[in-house]
Amino acid sequence: MRLSVRHSTLYQFDAPMRFVTQSHRLTPASNGCQKVIDWQVSAEGAEFGASFVDGAGDLISTMTLQGPVERITVVVEGTVETSSGDGILRGHREIVSPLVYLEATHATQPNRAMLDLRDLAVGGADGPLDRAHRLAGAVADAIAYTPGATTPQTTAAEALELGQGVCQDHAHTLIALAIAAELPARYVTGYLWTEGGGETAEASHAWAEIHVGRLGWIGFDPANRCCPDERYIRLGSGRDAREAAPIRGVSRGGGGEALDVSVVVAQQ
């Protein structure tokens, strides 16, 4: 499947900033399930620094805009050829040990209720792959996909208690349960193409990957009760949503900012 992406992020500041610096994780890596045909990231008036590939195999680049800065629009445009790998991340070059992803963050710290759900889900499971699938199913059952029910600051424990959330909450909760079950797990950002057939998903999407023995990293998307297939473009990863964020930045100046994001994923 060939997918095209246009992803626009608009920042508007209450007062002009003296300068803005951002770190971008906005360019997907080619692997066994996706091949980048063309891709570019742009922002009018911005200077882009050198790029590098981090230990997790993600391409990181920097962008700086000298002030006064009243607004910034970061535009991502590209085309990717995708195929289904049954959720298995194949041919992705990284040097970080999976054991790094056994450490929970604030967003993925399990509480008693989550440990009870883990025990209920994996009881009688036949090996780590079966445990991973059962945990993903348990998250899908426990948290109803409800846009607007949570915020970017909501933790996995809070989303589970609420019983509602979005893809970020599903991913955080699955990561927490997997780590509690001694399975390395991480947060993944990317894009999802849908036909409008009723899937509970957004074009800009997130899911979790769990490391399962010799199979390596396997993606699980509880929001859609599936493993990533040819409809998905994998962008980047981290221990949680904050670490995996496509854009992270700092600015110098006073006042607040407003953010508007638009994502269009189409099949060519």
Image (cartoon, rainbow, N blue to C red):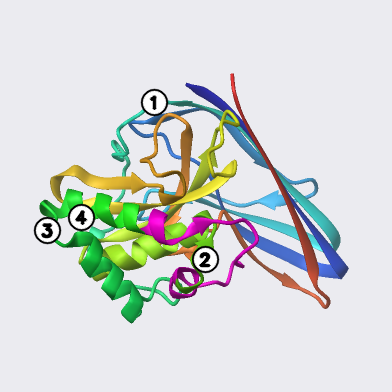
Amino acid type shown at disc 2:
Arg
Q: Which residue is mark 2?
A: 242
Q: What residue did someone put label 1 on? A: 83
Decide if residue 243 is on the left or right side of residue 56. Answer: right
Front: mark 3 or 2? 3
Q: What is the C-alpha distance between the residues marked 4 and 3?
A: 9 Å
Which is closer to the viewer, label 3 or label 1? 3
Look at mark 4 in the image and give the residue it sits on: 131
Report the magenta residues as a range.
Answer: 139-160
Real-space Cα separation, disc 2 to disc 1, in angstroms: 28 Å
Q: Amino acid at mark 3?
A: Gly
Q: Considering only order in the chain, which callout, 1 or 3, is on the residue closer to the N terminus?
A: 1
- Left or right of 147? Residue 199 is left
**Residue 57 in magenta stretch:** no
Q: Position of residue 248 (x, y in %)?
A: 60, 62
Is label 4 or label 3 in front? 3
In three-dimensional space, the C-alpha distance between marks 2 and 4, rounded to whole angstroms, equals 26 Å
The disc placed on residue 124 is 3
